[in-house]
Image: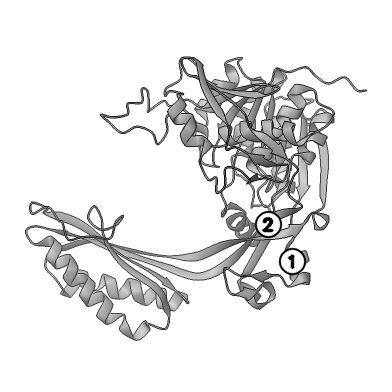
Amino acid sequence: MKTRHVRRPRIGAGSAFAGDSLPPAVDLAESGEVDYMMFDRLGEATMTQATLRRMKNPNKGYDPRTGEVLKALGGYLRRGGVVAGSFGQANVECALAEAVDAARAAGLSGLRIGAMHGGDVLDHLKRQNVELPELGCRINELGERLICAHAYLGAEGFIELLEAEATFLLAGRIADPSMAVALTYDAMGWDELTPQRAALGTLAGHMLQGSTGISGGGFADPPYRIVPGLAPLGFPYVILDEDAVQVTKLPAAGGLVTAETVKCRVGYEIHDPRSYLTPDVDMDMSMIELSVPAPDVVELRGMRGKPRPEKLRALVGVRNGYKALAEGSLGGFGCVDRAKLVEEIVRERLRPLEGEILDLRFDIYGVSTMYGNAANVPPELNELRYRVAAHCRTRDAARVVCNETGMVYFDRPAGVAGPKAEIIEALTVVGVPVDRSAVSVQTEVVTA
C-alpha cells in the first residue's frame, strides 16, 4: 500500500462564503495548529449566478479570489499544508488555470493542484423532463428561463485527489461537509469510508462551513451575551479522533467557543436531526452529546452514520422575472402618516399593472420591515426610510414600479428625500433528486 504523507487530524475553517474575510484564515494557517484548511465558497444560488457570469464570458464563472487565497496561503502550502475548497463554482477549468498561474507567480514550484470536474446534470434532467413541483411545471416547459442544474458531489473525488498527493484541491458544487469528509479520511489514514466514518467527517464539516458562526458570529446580544473581540473575530478549527470532534479557536483570536455557540451551529440548516442527508451519509444527530473539557473547547460525540442516500440532490437554477426596489426618506413631524400616504399613492398608480406584478410590498425601515406592523410607532419618530419591493414578470413592469415610486419625490407628500431605485433579475433555485448513475466525476492533478 502507498504510504501517505502523515498529517494531524486538525482542520481549520477557511471561509463560509466567497466573500468571507481572508486574514483570519491566514492566521489559522500560519499558527501551526492545523494541517488542513477547508474553504466553503458557495451558497445555494452561487452556481446559478456563476453560470450566468460564464455565459457572458467563458473565462469567468469561478471564484475570482482563487489566486488570492492560494498566494496568501503560499507559506502554509509550501510547508505541506492542504487547502480544499469549492473555488471552481461553475468553471472548474478556469479556476484550475488561475490556481496554477498563481502558484507559479508565488514561486510554489512543484505544488500539486487537484481539480474535481463533474456534477452538471442539466441535460440528464431535460431528457427525463423532470417535474419541478415548486414551480408547478416540468423542466422543459421553462424554455429560456432555465439556466443550469448541478448535483451536490460527495467526498470521493477529493479523496482520489488526496491519494494522488494534491495539496490544493478545488471543485464546483461539492457538498460543504463532503470536503471535510475527504480531509478526515486522509488525516485518519483510512482505507474505507464507512457510514460511521463519514458521519464523523460530516459533523466536522458542518461545524467548519459556518466559519465565525461557531466562534461568536451572530451570537452577541448585549448585555445578555457578550462576545469579546468581535472586530477581529477568529475562525474555528476542529481536532478529530475516531469518535469525537473537538471545536476550538486560536487563543489570541477574537470571539469565543462555548457550548451555546456550538449548539447554535449544530442545529443550523438541519431539517431533521435524525436524518441529515449528504452525498456521503445519512447522519443521525439527535443524540449528540456536548462537553466542555477546557475554555474555548467543545467536544461533540454521539453522531451516528447510516448508509448514504440512494439518490443525489441537484439544484436547478431558473430565471424568475425581475425585482424592482425603490425607496426614499421622509423627515419631520408626521413622517409615518406621510409614508402611509406614499404607499396609498404608489399602490393606486400601480393598479393597472396587477397582472404583471407577482408580489408587492411596502416597508418602513425600523418600523414594519421585519414584522409588518406599523401600529406601535414611537410618537417621537421624526425620520424614516420607506421601500417598495415588487416581483415582476418583465423588466418593463419593474421599470414602471421604479418610475412611479420615484414620482413621489417630485410632486406628492412633503419632505421626501434621497430617492433610489434598482432593478435586479430574479433567480430561483429548486431542488430535485437525481440518480447517482447520471453524475460523472473526473479528477486531474496539475503540477505548478
Discs 2, 1 touching: Cβ within 8 Å: yes
Q: Percent x, y for residue 112?
A: 78, 30
Image point (61%, 62%), residue name = 317
Name the outermost residue toward the right.
Answer: 1
| Residue farthest to the bottom, as pictured | 352
- Specify few, some or many for label 2: CA neighbours under 10 Å numbering under 14, 14-19, or 20 or more: many
Q: Is residue 406 left or right of residue 354?
A: left
Front residue of this view, candidates 153 and 106: 153
Residue underneath mark 1: 125
Q: Residue at x 79, y 34 (%)?
A: 194
Which residue: 8% across, 62% down?
334
| Amino acid type indicated by mark 1 | Leu
Callout 1 crowding tier (Cα within 10 Å): few <14, some 14–19, many ≥20? many
Whole-Å distance between the Cαs marked 2 and 1?
Answer: 10 Å
User: From where the camera sits, is residue 229 visible?
Assistant: yes
Q: Earlier in the sequence, mark 2 or mark 1?
A: 1
Q: Position of residue 63 (x, y in %)?
A: 61, 45
Q: Quadrant of residue 56?
A: bottom right
The quadrant of the picture occupied by the N terminus is top right
Residue behind mark 2: 314
Residue 104 seen by the camera: no
The front one of 296 and 252 is 296
Quadrant in the picture for the C terminus: top right
User: Which secondary structure, mark 1?
Assistant: helix
Amino acid type at image mark 2 = Ala
Residue at the spot 64% in from the left edge and 36% down from the top edge: 67
Task: Find residue 92 and report its horizontal and vertical position in percent.
Answer: 72, 47
> Where residue 68 appears, x then y in whole percent?
60, 34
